[in-house]
Image (spheres, rainbow, N blue to C red):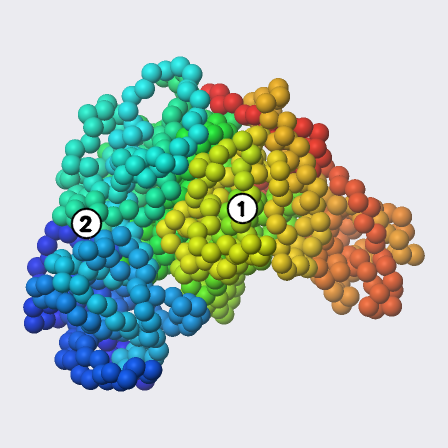
Amino acid sequence: MHFSGQSSPTPLPDKPVAVDVGYGEPSQAQGTKMIKGWEFTSLFDGGNALWCSWTRQEPFKAKPGGVTEDVEYLTFSVEIARDCHGLKLMEKPKASWFYFGVTPERRYKGTVKFSVQGMCEQRDLFAAGYRPWVSSPSSPRWRRLDGDVEVGASKLFHWHCSWKYTFDGTEGMTRFAFCHPYGYGELMSWLNRLDAIFCRPRPRGRMAEARVIDSRRSQREFLERFELGLAEELPEAMATCSASSSSSHDEADAAEGGKAELNYFEDRDWHDDVPRAGTGIYYRRQTVARTPQGRWVEMLTITEEPEDAGDGWPRDELPEEVKQALHSRGAQSAASAKPPLRFPGRPVCFVSSRVHPGETPGQFAANGFLQFVLSDDPRAAQLRRQFVFKIVPMLNPDGVAWGHYRTNTLGCDLNRCYRNPTPEMHEGVFAAKSLLLGWAERGDLLFYMDCHGHAARRGCFLFGNHHCSQAWSSEDALLWNLAYVHSTQLNCPHIDIDACEWSRAIEAKKGRGDTEQEDEVDETSRSDSGRAQIGASCRLYHAYTLECNYHISRTVRPSPDVPGLPPGAYLAQALQGEVREGKRPKPMPYGPREWAAVGEGLAVALLDLHCISAHSRLVDARPPRPLLPPDKDLALVSMGLERLFNALSARHRSAGTPQPVVLHGEGGPSLRRRIFKVVHTPHVYIRDKPAKTGSSLGIRKTGETMAALEVRSDGWIKLDPSELKKLCRKGCTEAYMMVDGTSVGLGVLLADTKQMEPFPIADYMEGGVVAQVAPSIEDVEQGLYPVLRTARPA
């Protein structure tokens, strides 16, 4: 592919015969090249460096600024392989992810300069001091490079990133990556470890009480239970697990997994503060999709194990279209495997990551979420008792294995196809959306989270949906949406509430491009993303995108202590580095430990809002106030946050007292609408758009009341659909009334009565998915929510 005004990137020569690298077929760009005794390779899981583009520049003398002595060093340059490099119809013009290995001449000691060409511009990221990551034979744990990094316009195309590295003479391969890598084979190895722990047969009966974490054992337990290396042989107990407990792969595929890199993974871990595994856990692993390259998209089901799950207990079957997609890719065993149990009465919480392969911070956040809900922390035990967690750790394994930045191996950005995914082009997303719609149609789905990395903004933050203009939503739904984000701020010091945003985008916008730069800057406008489409199609008020910066926070707010638990139980949220007394801590650099802590915070925030726990931070604390005022269209709803958190705090303080237990499906759901009253004489017009120039649809006389679907920030209200039925003009789909006419010389027209009236949700469905109805603050204050749930077969 040629870029206007720039040199053409290196073409691909004939590729040497590929070797078995343990993760499936490599891409055309992954390979190995020898230059005068130096070996350069990207021929491994997640590798990205155009193997044939390596060049060597002999030592020369230069005088860097501020240094009086001449410095000699070798210089090696390489081009980034863009997504689908060499596939002309699929190749993408930009990339940032690189990952390659260098084996120098025998026992080489000295400083070498490396230059990566062809990066898309990441000005904000590197301006904040970002540096790539390195893993060496003498120091295998991944760390950021020391010293300065040079970035700027490349002589070839786009940007370059250059740095110096000193080899210490230790034999072996040194690896460099844009960010801390985490490959497909690495995930499969870890899931095999989890299978070995949680698929062991266990006696029926009451589960043991969850144990408090012993912080001194956390690192040892990590090495014993959560080590990333692939087990040579899984325990014999694995053979006794049901077909759904482990991936239903063909025998040949099961033999894959990266044994060639076993020693490499054994020497690595990605953070220490990992809790011990819990007990009484229902854990099932199943395959939900097979990729075009033959890799597997895996989903974990995690909840509290039932005491007596006999043959009559219902099972959570895969949708027929997902089974057909598996059959079409030759995965008959996965399609016919026994599905996990279904737990009526326990809402489903779904978490996914790595839809964009190069965004590894999102992977570590999802891993942190998974580790926490599998732990022996009493809060995790409470979450398992209340919810069913469905976790897809890697939605785009082909893109990950090929070292892509954003797309799968067919050139599709899988987070821009949730509107109409197909099994042929969007394998993991097609399966995920089908499953989510199925749970939503049953009324089981409560929560959706997709985890990403971010380069343009510092900090970790959430994007949510603003659905108040939709008939199936309500102010209560937006309030709980906001409350969840504020609760994550309370439970994790790395969440930046002031960077969070809420988008109204559902319909596709015309005339917009789809470039990576726009994705970074204007993520919330992406109406085809998972957050936007799952929130709308499943009518879900808890639908979010998590964004974790690759580098550093913007601000840090320390989390308060957890009531009733020792500090060792929540080491993941402890701040490291300098903490200034009486002042806000300095911005902190991020790594796997911090990203995993964000995942834990996401899980604990669910406990704050939807469980009753003596260990909720809301017992003694409240979310910190944002530094910035809320957006205009969030200001009215935000006024209810303090009252809601006070009510939730009272519920958590009541933990231990007898609580009502409700069965799935009890009660008639309704949506509450704010009531306005006409105070202007003699009447106020109803118009077809929120403007005085809109056509008149009717009037409301002084003293009459009406239900508002949405209170807009521009001084108008959008009327509830029930009000449209009262109009003489038929066929109207929207109607608006002006609240304050001072700007046009009319004064105040409508008054907020401060009353909220219920309307049956069935009136708003029109045959679609039944929306999740958010509880009212009054429900919480009266002890009607949260409630204890119990799973019972239908």
| Residue at the farthest right position | 681
Q: Nearer the viewer, residue 141 or 515?
A: 141
In the rendered image, residue 739, in percent from the top left (x then y), is placed at 80, 57
Q: Can residue 23 be seen from the camera position used here?
A: yes
Q: Amino acid at mark 2?
A: Tyr
Question: Is 482 left, or right, of 404 in this rendering?
Answer: right
Relative to 711, residue 52 above or below: below
Q: Which residue is mark 2?
A: 264
In the rendered image, residue 718, in percent from the top left (x then y), is placed at 71, 54
Rendered image quadrant of residue 613: top right
Question: Is 510 left, or right, of 54 in this rendering?
Answer: right
Relative to 409, residue 373 above or below: above
Q: Which residue is mark 1?
A: 559
Q: Nearer the viewer, residue 609 or 721?
A: 609
Which quadrant, please, contains the N terminus? bottom left
In the rendered image, residue 90, in percent from the top left (x then y), is placed at 29, 64
